[in-house]
Image (cartoon, coloured by chain):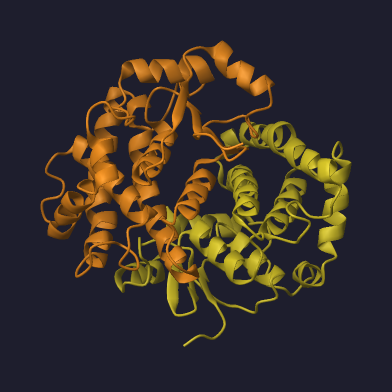
Chain colours: A yellow, B orange
Amino acid sequence: MSGKPKLHYFNGRGRMEPIRWLLAAAGVEFEECFIETKDYLTKLQTDGSLLFQQVPMVEIDGMKMVQTRAILSYIAGKYNLYGKDLKERALIDMYTEAMMDLSELLMSYPFQPEDKKEQHLANAVDKAINRYFPVFEKVLKDHGQDFLVGNQFSRADVQLLEILLMAEECKPDILAKFPLLQQFKAKTSNIPTIKKFLQPGSQRKPLPDEKDIQKARKIFF
Amino acid sequence: MAGKPKLYYFDGRGRMESIRWLLAAAGVEFEEEFFETREQYEKLLQGGSLMFQQVPMVEIDGIKMVHTRAILSYIAAKYNLYGKDLKERALIDMYVGGTDDLMMLILVFPFLSDEDKEKQLAVIVQKATSRYFPVYEKVLKGQNFLVGNNFSWADVHLLEAILMVEEKKSDVLSGFPQLQAFKKRISSIPTIKKFLEPGSQRKPVPDDKYVETVRRVLRMYYNVKAI
């Protein structure tokens, strides 16, 4: 019996955030069940809700889906955000896998021990500026279109916007040398479903603060 | 211009092995170019062949594909090993996610210090027998394949994972009768049987020479810690 998708995670970004973004971009309303304590996580692990005892978990269309990639692929496929054929899919997959690598670096920054933070940030910024952003800047330059793949809005565009904003949170002028990415950011932010998600009061989660970090450490580590 | 897919990587397993398995299972012949020197690798880098400056890279159907998961998904879909609809795809993606997480624990193994190797071995066996194998054991009760009663990428990936863990602990499947039967069954599929025979493009367990080559060519992974 399907109703709205239901997201099981802690009340923060982590690995669930790209899923929130994609559902929001697709205009899909969703509910959230927040894991507040280690006991509740243990309960989910022992009652068989989590295939590999891990979150994110999303209840959708009668399935209890786990594995972030699997969930994102399913949503993208269902809501036509995965290109029109196998080759467009291949491009989308290559771009989004790379974005996930960068996201991992950016996302884990607040959780680094104090003495490792500076180096971690420097590495993340270096990778963003030298490895990842130049590729997407070039893709946009080469075809001159608004969207990354096939002249059509896809999950790759949603994920790119998310990453650009995360990167700017780490270093506000990080897009200085990437005019097309700046343009992309402005245009994509204006897409109605995304514009709504970017407004206060949406289900988008903020950067973790010290309290959130301590809480996550208690539940997950 | 279609020819055989061409794989660019080291002469060893690493992240490319799952791709070799899948191509072989699909009965697709492929060529390989192995990195022996830093210069070879830099040539590829400077030529712009590596989209994000990383390998694996597979030249297939006119695209220079990178990122293991993207490559595997493409091959699976192209050769009808990705289920018949969105929901079967979802199951396959979930199962492959699990076996991938398990195999990642083994991937780093050769790069660890001897002391860390011992610890990691315990982690691999513990995760395999308490987190991953029980899931697949349960799924396989009453069916021959993991998803949709049809051979898929998920089955190939699981067999690869099982064999890799067995290399670390030969009796690890005791207590998992379904997985034992699965292993026998999938190993006897003609394309897979061929891949398991000596002389195939399957790579052996990584040794010190492999580790040294990777470090020399990539100038990385000198100080890998157990996850």
Q: Is residue A35 visible?
A: no
Point 34% across, 67% down: residue: A45
Which quadrant holds residue A102?
top right
Which quadrant holds residue A11?
bottom right
In front of the other: A131 or B90: B90
In screen coordinates, is B33 left or right of B148?
A: right
The percent coordinates of residue A197 (x first, y second) are 74, 70
Which quadrant holds residue B92?
bottom left
The percent coordinates of residue B97 (x first, y second) are 42, 54
In front of the other: B85 or A179: B85
Point 34% across, 48% down: residue: B157
Instruction: Indicate whether B83 appears above or below A149.
Output: below
Instruction: Indicate whether A123 appears above or below B102.
Output: above
The percent coordinates of residue A106 (x first, y second) are 64, 45
Instruction: Indicate whether B16 appears above or below B141.
Output: above
In screen coordinates, is B109 left or right of B37?
A: left
In screen coordinates, is B138 left or right of B83?
A: left
Q: Is residue A186 visible?
A: yes
The percent coordinates of residue B126 (x first, y second) are 24, 48
In front of the other: B33 or B165: B33
Point 75% across, 49% down: residue: A164
In screen coordinates, is A36 left or right of B66?
A: left
The number of callouts visible is 0
Point 33% across, 26% down: residue: B110
